[in-house]
Image (cartoon, rainbow, N blue to C red):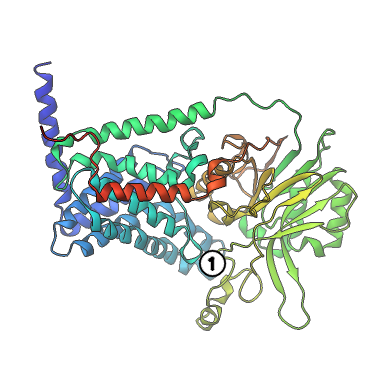
Amino acid sequence: MQGFLPRIGAMTETGAAFFDGISNLAGWRRAAAALFAGAIGALAMAPVYALPLLPVSLSVLVLMIDGAVERPHPRRSAFWIGWLWGVGYFLIGVYWMSFSFFVQADQFAALAPLAIFGMPAGLGLFTGAAALSATLCWRPGWPRIFAFAGVFAVFEYLRGHILTGLPWNLVGQSLAGSAVGTQTAAWWGAYGLSLIVIFLCAAPAAGMGAKGERKHGLSGFFVLAAGTALIFGVGAIRLLDVGDEASPSAYVRIVQPNIEQRDKINPDKWGDNFYRALDLSKDRAPADAPLFIIWPENAAPLLNEADAALDVLRRDLPQESVLVSGAVRRERSPSRTDLYFNSVMVLDLRGRETSPAKFYDKHHLVPFGEYMPFYDLIQSIGLSQLTPYGDAGFTPGDGPRTLTVQGSSFAPLICYEAIFPQALYPRGERPEWLLTVTNDAWFGDTSGPRQHLDQARLRSIETGLPMARSANTGVSALIDGKGRILERLKLYSAGKIEAPLPRALPSTLYERAGDWLFCMMTLAFLAAARFGFQPGAREPD
């Protein structure tokens, strides 16, 4: 023991000198370190889930902000460090967006660099602004960790709302590789989970760097270890339940046809695509509950106008079943240009309906992918062909809906809509389950479809509602109200999931309170930063 303690002390001093060096980096070394730290932080997301890299990434960012506040222009320096960190983080995190430009490479491949570099540069503005804002209440030791976590989480929230929002790869999503790590999202949602994870991952920097205080030593590592154990321990306890053995209220048949994107957008292939999905849907329906057959996004374009296709569905699908299909819906107008909607259409075969009985129109559209902001300007520079239908693209629907068919109520979500906490269904109209249809074939065999699934898992945990998710090329899944993936189909495999629908759980705290708890937590963190809260600190004798 006498030899062990001095060695620990020497190692601590060596580590302190190393982290001081990070704070004092300058020039290209500082820029490269910020980019690299952001990039390795993104590896904590699907499909790598290298979680130990996230504390390294965020602690390094804290130490580099330490160095910035000592410079002649601290706020400017902090902004550039935060921006470069964000560029690295999003370069690795959203690179997959560029794959969509190669589906029609002859037209759009030249625009791929815009997605590869332009998107990270734009999203990095949020992390840059967060770093700058954190310096306004940057104080030695633990207060700066509270400031960093609170401000960074606020800017993640802003990223999820400004300019229609893109809450992709929130830091808390790093835990969504398993249900156990994300159970607390039922209390404070994805943004609250991110706040906690940011704090824990930045904690090791509490006693390091130019603004750290040596008296805190390794306390940050203990906070990280204890906090992580608590999150996973609470999650494990919450998952220790006995399954509901009651008869199911409904069955789902989730179809994954696995159609390449070039074939999916080719009108000459629409018939083949239709029959591929139909062949996976024909088996007999269970007798004791309704069967919902779910086809992915835009599986049957203009289905309500295709009389021959409707006749085939009525003939070949099981009687008493319900087909819920992604489709494009058109509203014809003799006086102006037709309007197109990215929709979910419902065909109730109990009474051998002659046309879709209900529909939902996607209300949260993807800018530049489904509609064209500033269309007149975009048209003038020759980019109007980016939109899939009509002139300016799809028309947004009126908002979330809850649909009830054969006594079972569900809230439909189309692709992009499943990445947003809240606004999944109208207030006061809680459904029994969530239904998501998507088409991730645009993005190939990349991290994008896998990260998309993780966000769907969070929506189920936040609401306590099971989800049936049909994805054209994967990943299709059946998820229960605690985020457990009961069944899934792998990416780029054709098949179907047929299973009883899990029952809805009681309403969660997050479902009732929304982001108010997150707001109060953030204010508490900022107050701790302002008033100098120091975990474990003692008053001098």
Residue 499 against residue 296 in the figure, above or below: above
Does residue 448 appear to the left or right of 529 in the view shown? right
Which residue is painted at 38% across and 51% down in the image? 153
Instruction: Provide residue 177's location: percent of width, then percent of height.
Output: 48, 38
Residue 341 against residue 377 in the figure, above or below: above
Question: Considering the image in quadrants, where does the N terminus appear?
Answer: top left
Instruction: Provide residue 425's location: percent of width, then percent of height.
Output: 64, 53
Does residue 128 appear to the left or right of 289 in the view shown? left
Is residue 8 shown to the viewer in this render? Answer: yes
- Give the number of callouts: 1
> In terms of depth relative to the viewer, which is nearer, 228 or 536?
536
Secondary structure type for disc 1: loop
Assess disc 1: are there few (<14), some (14-19) or many (≥20) residues with their C-alpha within 10 Å of its C-alpha.
Answer: some
Which residue is painted at 26% across and 53% down in the image? 34
Residue at the extreme front: 541
Does residue 314 appear to the left or right of 465 in the view shown? right
> In terms of depth relative to the viewer, which is nearer, 74 or 528?
528
Does residue 241 appear to the left or right of 203 in the view shown? right
Residue at the extreme top: 1
Residue 527 against residue 10 in the figure, above or below: below
Q: Report the residue marked by disc 1.
A: 367
Is residue 60 shown to the viewer in this render? Answer: no
Instruction: Provide residue 306's location: percent of width, then percent of height.
Output: 82, 62
Question: Considering the image in quadrants, where does the C terminus appear?
Answer: top left
Which residue is painted at 42% across and 39% down in the image? 49
| Quarter location, residue 253 | top right
Instruction: Provide residue 289's location: percent of width, then percent of height.
Output: 81, 36
**What amino acid type is highlighted by mark number 1?**
Pro
